[in-house]
Amino acid sequence: MSNAAPGPAMDYEEFRKLGHETIDLITDYLATIRDTPVFQPLTPQQRAGLSQRPLGDLPDSPRDILHEAVSDILPYAMGNGHPRFFGWINSPPAPIGVLADLLAAAQGAACDVGDIAPLWLERTAVAWLSEIVGYDPQTTMGILVSGGSVATLTCLTVARQHCAETDGWDVRRDGLSGDRRMLTYITEQTHSSVRKAVELLGLGSASIRIVPTDDELRMDAAALERMVAQDRAAGARPFCVVATAGTTNTGAVDPLADVARVAHAAGMWLHVDGAYGAVAAVHPELRGTFEGLAQADSITMDPHKWLSVPIECGCALVRDRELMRRTFSLVPPYLRTEEGKGIGGPPSYAEYGIQQTRGFRALKVWMVLRHAGRQGIVDLVTRNVALARLLAGLVDQTPGLRLAAKPQLAVVAFQYVPADGDDTDRVNAVNRALEHALQTDGRTFVTGTVLGDRFVLRASVLHYATSEEDLRELVSTVCRIGAEVEKETLAGYLSQRAHF
Ligand SMILES: Cc1ncc(COP(=O)(O)O)c(C=O)c1O
């Protein structure tokens, strides 16, 4: 047997040099990102190079690998690190979070069992997140997961356990045998991850009830109450309401206190999807909007959204710690530890969620939040909300643009209105084409969505470095490219018509 260490081993002096070089390259990347395109499409050759490279038989030079990663991969991201990225709900990574991920990778801890620092730190990270939503950190249980979707799946699994325990059956043993019509109430605006969770839990998407919304796209609590009563009278089991604190489309926050009253009076679980907006509960002017949030039985948070914790990081918060444990706990002999003996520490995080081996997400939450401080979080949210309001004002004042919904939190939904009229199909076609043209243009980045029968553009302001100037550039770019797209789509329409 050779004495040379195999595969992954590296000489530590070489590692040190490469590490310093890496930090320099990362710093250049972050410091100059504003001067690069927000998004740049890959060429067919680049795609092939990235997706089809065979694994070589012999080792490659670490330095070559590093430089190739920086030149051929780093610039071709979604663009959310750029201050003029306004797509979906994706924030930039906080610089200290980038360092945190590096440290966590170096430690390589499996964060499930043991009297280890990462697990104690996760308690603090989760306690800080709990405080933001008004939960009592002493009694709440929370677990960091990959993102909002898994947080919601985790919470709704606890909700299903709660329903089974309340009704006297054992979902872990018996599954969903029998005719259990367990209904979940959402709105048209609820994120698709909720439907996915309901499907994964075996409840079936046919068990979802869509509650009407008011003119600000918020759940109508009175309609919810009526629907629950009717469904119960028809023999079904209304089991869970999922309200949203900050919808993806427009940032709408459902009337949480009213929804909580209806849900709890009917013996239902209330889950709040706060993946996007729950953090905005710290905004001094928005406290009223979030009233009732802490009455939820569980909450999805997503530190990799507004808090700028590097992707991936979501958080499932559940008020009843023991119920959460009963939902997931399964400890075989080879995983059993005893507190105070050997490595034994607090109960394993695997007893509160889906994963066994877990990465050290808590470190980046802890470092990013500690660096920002409570005031830093308030300032970030306040600034982004103010910028979104400014953008809404700019849209409102600009001929050829119109707001598509009342702006809430930091999302602005709007449309480009072609000069030749207001036909819905034509406006939709122009805005669809405009979304794509804006994305490939590289100066700015927005995404689209559908509100009723309208296709609209939406800009979400989440970056800590976005400026007023960036918003003015967004508006002028939309107008300029909108006019080009308008001409092209009109030419397309006319030639299509000539064709037939
Ligand atoms: C309101 C809302 N809920 C849930 C999610 C899903 O979160 P994730 O993408 O982290 O799984 C999103 C994502 O944008 C969202 O906006």
Image (cartoon, rainbow, N blue to C red):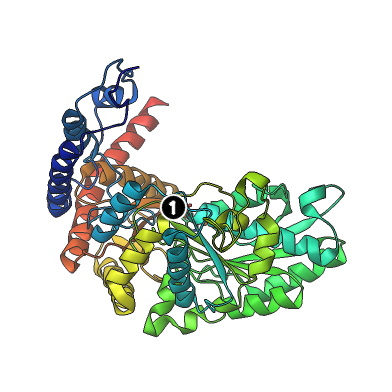
Please, what is the three-letter code of the amino acid marked with disc 1?
Answer: Thr
Using residue 220 as the reference point, say whether residue 309 is left or right of it: left
As helix, strand or loop, the secondary structure at mark 1 comes to: strand
The answer to whether residue 174 of the structure is visible from this angle is: yes
Give percent across and percent down for residue 401. Answer: 30, 61
Residue closer to the observer: 170 or 333: 333
Q: Nearer the viewer, residue 46 or 494?
A: 46
Indicate the position of residue 428 as horizontal and vertical percent values. 41, 49
Point out residue 413 in the picture as x, y percentages from the top left corner: 38, 61
Q: Residue at x 73, y 50 (%)?
A: 203
Quadrant in which residue 320 is drawn: bottom right
Could you classify mark 1 by the number of other residues whose Cα lies within 10 Å: few (under 14), some (14-19), or many (20 or more)?
A: some
Of the pair 298 and 287, the residue shown nearer to us: 298
Identity of the residue drawn at 44% across and 52% down: 449
Residue at left offset 39%, top offset 70%: 407
Rendered-image quadrant of the C terminus:
top left
Q: Residue at x 25, y 65 (%)?
A: 464
| In the depicted structure, whether residue 488 falls above or below residue 183 | above
Residue on which the image places disc 1: 449
Task: Examine the rendering and report whether any part of residue 419 can be seen.
Answer: no
Query: Which residue is nearer to you in this view: 86 or 364?
Result: 364
Quadrant assignment, res 316: bottom right
Query: Whole-percent x and y of residue 102?
Result: 29, 50
Q: Is residue 277 above or below residue 160?
A: below
* Residue 313 lies in quadrant: bottom left
Q: Is residue 169 above or below residue 384?
A: above
Give left or right: position of 464 versus 352: left
User: Count of labels shown?
Assistant: 1
